[in-house]
Every structure is written in C-alpha cells, then in structure tokens.
Image (tube, rainbow, N blue to C red):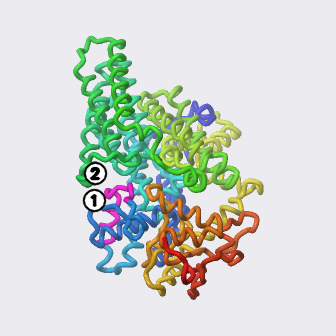
C-alpha cells in the first residue's frame, strides 16, 4: 500500500535538498500544468456565447438567479414558469454571489454576456478558495512542497474537476469547501474552542446550502463527542464550540433565507425545523457536557451522551416522522422508478461501472486508495499532528465511499479529501528519488503508489484497455441529446410561437426556461411531482401523449430529434425522430431547430 512503501521517506528541508524537485519553480510548474489540464476550460467559450452549462441543476440555478434579479422576492423561490409554480429547495445564499457577479459584469458586458461571465467566474472563485484551504491545511503539517503537490493532485481528480469546472454554479462546490475547511479546523492535536466554533459555523453554512453533507457533519459531531467521552474536560473546548456554533448559526441562517410564513413548515429536503431540532440538540448536548463536574468519570459522560442522543432522536421521530424516510417523501413509485433512480448523480457504483467503467475507476479507486493510505498513516505516522489530519481524512473518505456505493453523489465531498493524503504521499515519493540506499524498483513503486490516488491516471489506464474505455452508447446518446436539444439556439427558435405551456421530456425543462419565453410542465426537481408524473406518463406511451397534454392544459408538445442507437431508443426518442406519430396532435413547423413541435389537434378536449 502507499504508506507501506514510504515508511523511511521524509519530507521537509533535508529531503527537499536531496530531491530533483528541490527547486520551487519546478514544483509550481507541475501545478500549473495540472491547472492547464483542468477539466472544463474547453467549454468556457460555449458558456460565454450560448450559456451552455454543464448540468440541468446549473441551468436552473441561473434561472433562479435571473428571477431574483428581475425582482422576485428574496424569500420567494417559486418557479413561476413551471406548471404549479413549485418552490425550489435551494438556498439564496448561493444565488446571492452569482447575482452579485452578474451585476458587476453588466455595465461593461451587457446582460447576456454578464450571465456567462458569472457562470464561469463563480466556480473558479470557489476553486481558488478550495485550493487555499487545501494548501494551508497541508502546508501546516507537511511543508510547502507537499501542499503544492496536494494542489496538483486536486487537478488530477475527475470529481473535483467536475465540481469546480466553469459553469458549475450548483451548490455542491460550496458544500465541499465548507466541509473540507470544517475537517481541517478540527483535525489538529489540541483543537481549541475557536476551532470548534469555526467548524460549527461551517457546518451550519453547509446545511443552509443543502443537506447532502449532513452525514459528514454528523460524523464530526460524533467524533468530538467520542473524544470528550474518552478524555473529559481536556477535549471539551472543540466539542463545546462546535455544538454551540451549530446550534446558534444554523437558526440564524434559516431566518435569513426562509420566509416568516414558512418558519414552522417541515421540509425534509432543506434546512427547516427537523434539522434545526438536531442542530439545537447538538448545542444543548455540548452545553450540558460543559456543566458536568470535572471529576465525573467516563461512565457518567457516556450516560449524558446516551440520554441526549435518545432525546434528540426521540424528539425527531415524534415531531417529524415524515422525514425519517429521507428527503423524497411522498414521491410516487412511478417517479422514483422511472426518474429518480436514473438521475446520473443518484446512480449506484455498479450501474456507473456498467455504463462508464473509465469514470467509475477514476472516481471510486482514488477515494478507496486514499482512504487506505490515510488510515495507515494515521496508525503508523510519527507526528501527532499528521496522524490527526490523516485520521480525519480517512474518516471522511471511508464515509464518502460508503455513501458513494449506493449513490455516485456520495463521492462529491469525499473526493475533495483525497489530495490531503495524495500531496504528502507524492512529496515523500519524490524524496525517495535521491534517498541513499533507495533502490530503483522501490523508487518506481513509490511514485506509482503516490500517483494511484490521482483519478486521471486511472482514466489514462482505462483508455489503454478497450473494454474500459469510454461511456456506453446510451450515455453518449444522452449527452448528445442534451447538447443538441438544450442548445440556446435550438430553444430560442421556439420563441416564434406565442408564449405557452410546453410538455416535454423532464431534462429539457431547465433549458426551455433559461433560453426561451415558454413555461414548462416538468423539470428534474423532486418538489414538482405533478409535472414529473405527467412527463413520464406522456412520453412512455405515444397513445397517451395527447390525453396527458389535455390534462395538464399544454399548449405545445416538444420532443428532441437527435440521432440515437435504435437498440437503446425509448418511445420519446422515436417520437422525436418522427418514427412514431402521436395521435391527437398536429405538427407545428418551427425552422432552425432539432426540436419537433406539436399542438393538441383542433377540437381536442382540454382538461
């Protein structure tokens, strides 16, 4: 394993003097090469020119920001041009900086280009923040060279590259920065009250932005509670600071972004009373721990933790039973079966491995290897500070791997921790190049092991093996369909028609809202259940399409005309190519677009 290959290698000034990388310029040149090869640069032109964003969530975020700038209330997150005007569960705390960048760019770039500039700039600002957090955390314990190598390792991660690529204005990158900073605040021997307060505030920010990182926050709280249980008052300051900050900052952020009318409303998918209850429970538990007499033993401390834990869990079950099943409460089986489990970020590891084995290798193996290496380092490391950092890194990576096996998005936060171990590993491998007595085979093995946490190395390996190279035809067809039919020009061509309500496939909804003046029946968001049901029913059976369109009072029906493999074509694909003519509809010719358009036939019943 990587750590076992490098037990004798040392970082620091002496090792650097004996290394071919003793010159900072060479190390930073390597980092620059990694940045140049960072995923996403090629798409900047399309973002600036056509607002071609990487994902439907990025598109909907920009729609939400555009509504805010157009005068929609800070507290009003309803999508007025979506049938039923469902409220989004995303945070205005992410909308605000994106909107601010647009306002800054408008005077010299114009309204349209300003949106593209903001979409490019915001994830790059966050990338710089992540790089600063990463560099500082590694530099403190391992020196500048290991910290620089950590930055290089970050540029080699396919997950990190995807999270911070230009156009990624979704909230996952904000959460990633918050959770990595949280872990680094606590991952030090002798953590203080201030460290705990900082970590608790970052946890509250992450929860306000979205609940996806909740397991990492819970792990941090449990670890702090466990350390207090073992060491007593010596470990109380960070535990107290974390609990109090989480219990106080989370409600403050909730009030900032939530309309007063919704303060008592239960939302299982966003920061709301159920999660505020747990945050408050954490604060009260830490406060109770601080009031215990110093002479109380571990048994009594355990009793307090158990009592507080049972009260928190029992209150949650009693007051908010609907949230026990998770954020997707009330979702019909049709939507769960035909849409939710097919969303790319919700795919299990085995499914991704079957459809895109190269991405599965590059995504999962670095996290697994990093988890093993960090665990070994935490166990066998010489310095207490390094062991503490590696223990925190190992915990985050193992948790992310456990979350990522059933759902790909579990890797998002975890992958950002891989450079924390990859940088020091590469630093020590480089030190071996001129270490007296180190054999060539050991040097090569050490370098190979230190590069194993780099996802792009696995992409390169997969490209050399035909059985592992590239996504399958279904995923490639889906990518082509998104780029072709969601293109700004393709959607804008529909504006020759009077504004109306469009019934289309679910994933086309955000592009229709961003690039055109029409409303939509469906978009890929779980709070818009009636629209999801209608779109699934309509494009599952061509004979039912007209009836569903009448039921939802759609003015137009739109399908994508894009090449596809007949072996993987759905009914919707065949409708889009004109292979199936839906009964009860009449075609509407629209030039200069790959989209096919129909309207309900004259005399058709409207529900």
Residue toward you, 173 or 314: 314
Question: Which residue is disc 2 drawn over?
Answer: 262
Mark 1: which secondary structure? loop
Kindly report the secondary structure that dominates the magenta region of the rendered protein.
helix
Q: Considering only vertical position in the picture, is 238 above or below 351?
A: above
Which numbered tag is attached to residue 75? 1
From what the image shows, is residue 328 above or below residue 78?
Answer: above
Q: Quadrant of residue 4?
A: top right
Q: Earlier in the sequence, mark 2 or mark 1?
A: 1
The boundaries of the magenta stretch are 87-104
Magenta stretch: includes residue 341: no
Q: Nearer the viewer, mark 2 or mark 1?
A: 2
Q: Would residue 15 be seen by someone viewing this image from the given angle?
A: no
Question: Quick check: marks 2 and 1 in contact, CB under 8 Å?
Answer: yes
Q: Nearer the viewer, residue 289 or 8?
A: 289
**Badge 1 density bin: few <14, some 14–19, many ≥20, Cα 10 Å:** some
* Residue 232 appears left or right of 555: left
Quadrant showing the N terminus: top right
Is 174 positioned to the left or the right of 521 in the image? left
Q: Residue at x 28, y 20 (%)?
A: 233
Q: Is residue 99 magenta?
A: yes
């Amino acid at each position: 394993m990587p750590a076992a290959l490098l037990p004798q290698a040392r970082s620091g000034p002496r090792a650097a003097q004996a290394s071919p990388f003793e010159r900072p310029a060479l190390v930073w040149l390597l980092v620059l090469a990694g940045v140049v090869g960072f995923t996403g640069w090629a798409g900047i032109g399309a973002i600036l020119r056509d607002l071609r964003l990487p994902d439907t969530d990025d598109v909907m975020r920009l729609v939400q920001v555009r509504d805010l700038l157009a005068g929609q209330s800070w507290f009003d997150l309803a999508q007025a041009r979506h049938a039923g005007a469902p409220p989004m569960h995303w945070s205005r705390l992410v909308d605000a900086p994106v909107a601010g960048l647009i306002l800054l760019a408008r005077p010299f770039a114009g309204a349209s280009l300003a949106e593209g500039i903001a979409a490019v700039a915001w994830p790059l600002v966050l990338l710089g923040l992540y790089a600063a957090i990463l560099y500082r955390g590694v530099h403190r314990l391992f020196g500048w060279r290991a910290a620089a190598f950590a930055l290089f390792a970050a540029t080699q991660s396919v997950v990190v590259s995807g999270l911070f690529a230009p156009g990624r204005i979704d909230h996952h990158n904000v959460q990633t920065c918050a959770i990595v900073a949280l872990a680094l605040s606590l991952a030090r021997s002798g953590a203080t009250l201030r460290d705990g307060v900082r970590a608790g505030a970052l946890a509250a920010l992450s929860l306000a932005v979205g609940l996806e990182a909740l397991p990492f926050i819970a792990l941090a709280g449990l670890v702090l509670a466990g350390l207090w249980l073992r060491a007593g008052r010596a470990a109380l300051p960070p535990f107290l600071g974390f609990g109090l900050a989480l219990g106080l900052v989370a409600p403050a952020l909730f009030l900032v972004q939530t309309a007063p009318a919704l303060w008592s409303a239960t939302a299982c998918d966003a920061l709301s009373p159920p999660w505020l209850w747990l945050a408050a429970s954490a604060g009260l538990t830490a406060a109770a721990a601080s009031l215990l007499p110093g002479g109380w033993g571990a048994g009594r401390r355990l009793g307090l933790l158990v009592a507080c834990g049972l009260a928190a869990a029992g209150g949650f079950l009693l007051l908010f039973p609907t949230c026990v099943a998770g954020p997707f409460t009330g979702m019909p089986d049709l939507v769960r079966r035909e849409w939710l489990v097919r969303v790319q970020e919700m795919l299990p590891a085995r499914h991704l491995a079957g459809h895109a084995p190269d991405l599965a290798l590059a995504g999962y193996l670095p996290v697994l290897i990093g988890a093993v290496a960090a665990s070994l380092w935490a166990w066998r490391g010489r310095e207490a500070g390094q062991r503490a950092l590696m223990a925190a890194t190992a915990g985050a990576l193992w948790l992310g791997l456990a979350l990522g096996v059933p759902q790909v998005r579990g890797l998002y936060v975890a992958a950002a921790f891989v450079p924390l171990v990859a940088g020091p590993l590469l630093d020590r491998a480089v030190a071996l190049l001129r270490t007296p007595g180190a054999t060539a085979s050991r040097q090569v093995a050490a370098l190979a092991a230190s590069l194993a946490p780099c996802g792009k190395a696995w992409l390169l390996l997969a490209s050399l093996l035909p059985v592992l190279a590239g996504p399958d035809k279904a995923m490639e067809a889906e990518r082509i369909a998104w780029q072709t039919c969601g293109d700004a020009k393709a959607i804008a061509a529909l504006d020759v028609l009077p504004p109306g309500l469009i019934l289309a496939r679910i994933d086309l909804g955000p592009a229709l809202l961003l690039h055109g003046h029409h409303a939509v029946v469906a978009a890929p968001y779980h709070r818009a259940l009636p629209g999801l049901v209608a779109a699934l029913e309509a494009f599952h059976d061509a004979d039912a399409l007209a009836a569903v369109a009448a039921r939802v009072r759609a003015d137009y029906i739109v399908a994508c005309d894009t090449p596809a493999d007949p072996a993987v074509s759905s009914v919707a694909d065949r409708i889009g190519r004109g292979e199936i003519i839906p009964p009860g509809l009449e075609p509407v010719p629209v030039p200069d677009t790959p989209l096919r358009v129909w309207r309900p036939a004259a005399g058709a019943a409207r529900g």
